[in-house]
Each structure stands twice: as structure tokens, then as C-alpha cells.
Image (cartoon, grey):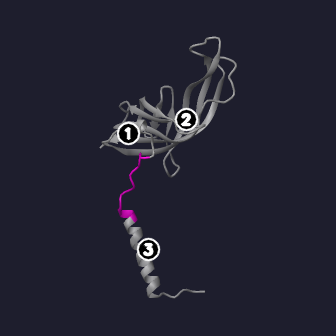
Amino acid sequence: MTTRPTPANGLFAAALLAACGLMQASPAMAYSQDALPAPVQVPAGHKVAWETVGTGEITYECRAKADAKDQVEWVFAGPKAVLKDRQGKQVGTYYGPPATWEAADGSKLTGTQVAVAPSGTGNLPYQLVKANPAVGAGALTGVAYIQRTALKGGVAPQTACTTAGQRSQVSYEADYIFWKAD
């Protein structure tokens, strides 16, 4: 069956092409912090500079409890993740300690945790980090804050640790949103 051009088909096609043109000409939608807890929202006067998705592992180590040296518990030992852009292309890495974000262009930075907030059972908390000045010129130059959002997994193992020094890696995924001053 063939479709013959009709005025209605032509109007629809024209409207569709016009809409596509408008979509390309309009700026990308701004990242919204509205759904995030207030403590981990970036202060006003900043804009998103880079959005990445981190996938990797959090390492936990079995260490003596601070208040009971004869007992052990899982303690955060560090992250190791690949950072990808929204299209799935690797654009950097995240590792530590200290927590370090490194872009594929060689720029990198560390930061100091400002706040955390619960993100749901079985997930790492939301996090807001104040960035230290970047080393090297590139994607991370001028970044002031990093947010950890959209979390999946990463919490300490539910099984008890028994031997000091024992390590366990736990898979996780999170969005890392990088913010610069306006």
C-alpha cells in the first residue's frame, strides 16, 4: 500500500520538521536539583559543567572498631570507577584515597566532603563535595562542586568481617555532576 501526498500529510510533515528544528535550536534542559535533599544541593550561582555516570567498585576493609579495639567492622577504603558521558563514552576515572576525579584530557581534582544525605536502602548516600583547584587544563578546570546522585548499590557488605585486613569490593553506580560558578 502506498501513501499519496495529501495536504494533511504535508502539514504533519512540515510541523514535524519545524518541531525538530526547534528542538535543535533550543538550549539543553537545565539539570534540576529539586528532588535532592537540601544539604547536598549546590549553592545558587553555579551551573552544570559536566555530567558523568560512574560505574565501578567501592572497597571496604575489615578494621578494628574505634571504640572496641577487640572487635572488627567494615570500613570504607576507597572507590574505583569508570566515568562515562550520557552517551556511554568513557570520559574519565574516579579513584582514591584521596577521592580523585580524573578526566580523559588529563585534568584532575580532589575535594572535601561538605554534606551527605540518605538515598535509599542499599545505596551509598547522596554527597556534595567542594572541589579543590584542578591540576592540569581541561574539563575539570574551574569546577567548584561535585554532586553524587542517582545511586545504586555500594554499601558495606552485609556479612560480618572476621579478620583485620580482609577486603571486599562492592559494585555501585552513581551520577557525578560537576558544577562551575556562573
User: Mark 1 falls on what kind of element?
Assistant: loop
Give the Cα distance between marks 2 and 1. 19 Å
Give the Cα distance between marks 3 and 1. 37 Å
Residue 130 location in percent, x, y?
Answer: 39, 32
Quadrant occupied by the N terminus: bottom right
Q: Nearer the viewer, residue 179 or 32?
A: 32
121, above or below 60, in the image: below
Does 6 lie within the magenta span?
Answer: no
| In this view, the mark in front (2 or 3) | 2
User: Mark 2 falls on what kind of element?
Assistant: loop
Q: Which residue is denoted by mark 2 in the rendering?
A: 124
Q: Which residue is denoted by mark 1 in the rendering?
A: 42
- Tell me what residue is drawn at x 34 percent, y 39 percent: 43
| Picture quadrant of residue 59 | top right
Highlighted range, magenta: 23-34
| Picture quadrant of residue 13 | bottom left
Are the residues tagged 2 and 1 within 8 Å (C-beta)?
A: no
Residue 76 location in percent, x, y?
Answer: 56, 26
**Disc 2 or 1, which lies upstream in sequence?**
1
Q: Amino acid at mark 1?
A: Val
| In this view, the mark in front (3 or 1) | 1
**Disc 3 or 1, which lies upstream in sequence?**
3
Residue 16: which disc? 3
Q: Amino acid at mark 2?
A: Leu
